Amino acid sequence: MPALLRIAVIGPGKVAHLHAKAALQTPNTQLVAVYGRTFHKADDFARQYGIKAYTDVREMVEREKIDLCLVCTTHPAHREPTIAALEAGSHVLVEKPLASTLEDCDAMIDAARRSNRYLGVISQRRFYAPSMRIREAIDAGKIGKPVLGTIQMLGWRDEEYYKSDAWRGTWADEGGGVLVNQSPHQLDLLCWYMGDIDEVYGVWSNLNHPYIEVDDTALAIVKFKNGGLGNIIVSNSQKPGIFGKVHVHGQNGASVGVQTDGGALFIAGRSSITDPPVNDLWTVPGEETHLAKFIEEDTAFFNTIDATVYYFGLQIAEFRDAIRQKRPPMVTGEDGRKVVALFQAIYESTRTGLPVKL
């Protein structure tokens, strides 16, 4: 492995700029190239970062000796460039969600196995200190077995947001709505904390966005394989955007939680992250008074960083270390598949009116 991990961006859209900036700030990495379907868009992006532009993924990976590709295309378009990059010899980290269908997920995971390369999915909210604190509490047995997990994500997306890119709000080019685009971070945390899912019953609706085809609100009841239960409420229909929260309640009666998003929820290319992620619930025996300290520490740290880039950088750095240490990354393609299986089950349950076994 060379001294510097050579990185390329695939898809020069809004979120790609955040990944590019994160890569530039990550030690022992070098941003060297970008792929775009049209040369002028790729070249415009490349000029901003002093890198090379390509319109062929395989050529880019092979010619530039790319170690890691960051895939930032629209969700249904993740499969093709991911497989091309893997087969050309690069490891791949895909923007959430891993894909919009399980068929695409499986094809990408299979390509990674055949190519002996690592595949991961962006889930930077796992790297928040409050999120890690919950995982550590669960691993240490501080709440007993996790028996109830809940998600509340209430936000807002206006008509201008959906008109800002032609692919937004469509089944064909976005792959879904709030379930596919806004909630995968919280869905990932729920699965990370509670474990594998057994059964899902869900419904979705479009409450106040008549100009889009897809869901702006979804609810679900989840049964986990460990015997625990879950409840999901996610929506883009609350002005001006309120919060995103994941709470876990344990068999011993203790509860832990994280507010991953507060205030007006973040939109790549249009807004910044203004509220710090914090633990908003902590009743671990003997630690009931720790919550204020956690909030103070996490808020103080948040005020020293650019949160829109910093946590992407943490995940890129962890993926860099995984490549060097020849171990799977913290967030794998299989983890990404679990999120897709969950939101696809909610869509299927709405179609049939029945629970869906995973």
Image (cartoon, helix red, strand yellow):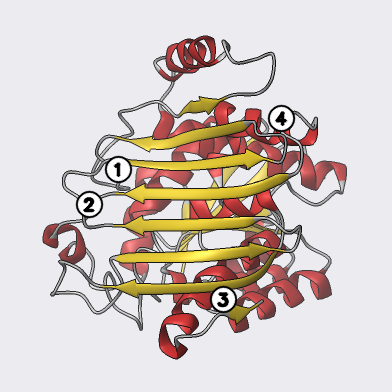
- Residue corresponding to mark 4: 137
Picture coordinates of residue 322 (x, y %)?
Answer: 78, 44
Q: Which quadrant of the figure contains the N terminus?
A: top right
Q: Which residue is mark 2?
A: 156
Instruction: Choose mark 1 or mark 3, whichever is in front.
Output: 1
Within 10 angstroms of label 3, few (less than 14), some, or many (20 or more) residues? Answer: many
The part of the image, by quadrant, that contains residue 103 is bottom right
Local packing at callout 1 (Cα closer than 10 Å; few below 14, some 14-19, many 20+) is: many
Label at residue 265? 1
User: Seen in the image, is 92 located left or right of residue 38?
Assistant: right
**What separation in Å lies between label 1 and label 3 (alpha carbons)?**
28 Å
Give yes or no for contact between labels 2 and 4 (Cβ–Cβ under 8 Å).
Answer: no
In x, y percent, where is residue 36?
A: 42, 67
Spatial separation of the CA atoms under disc 3 and disc 4: 36 Å
Circle 3: residue type: Arg
Q: Amino acid at mark 1?
A: Leu
Q: Amino acid at mark 4?
A: Ala
Please indicate, yes or no, whether residue 4 appears anywhere in the rendered image.
yes
Q: CA distance from mark 2 to mark 4?
A: 32 Å
The quadrant in which the C terminus is found is: bottom right
Look at the numbered discs 2 and 1 and tell me whether their residues touch, using CB distance below 8 Å.
Answer: yes
State the SS at label 2.
Answer: loop
Q: Residue furthest bottom?
A: 352
Local crowd size for mark 2, using a 10 Å CA cut-off: few (<14), some (14–19), many (≥20): some
Q: Secondary structure at mark 1?
A: loop
Q: CA distance from mark 2 to mark 1?
A: 7 Å
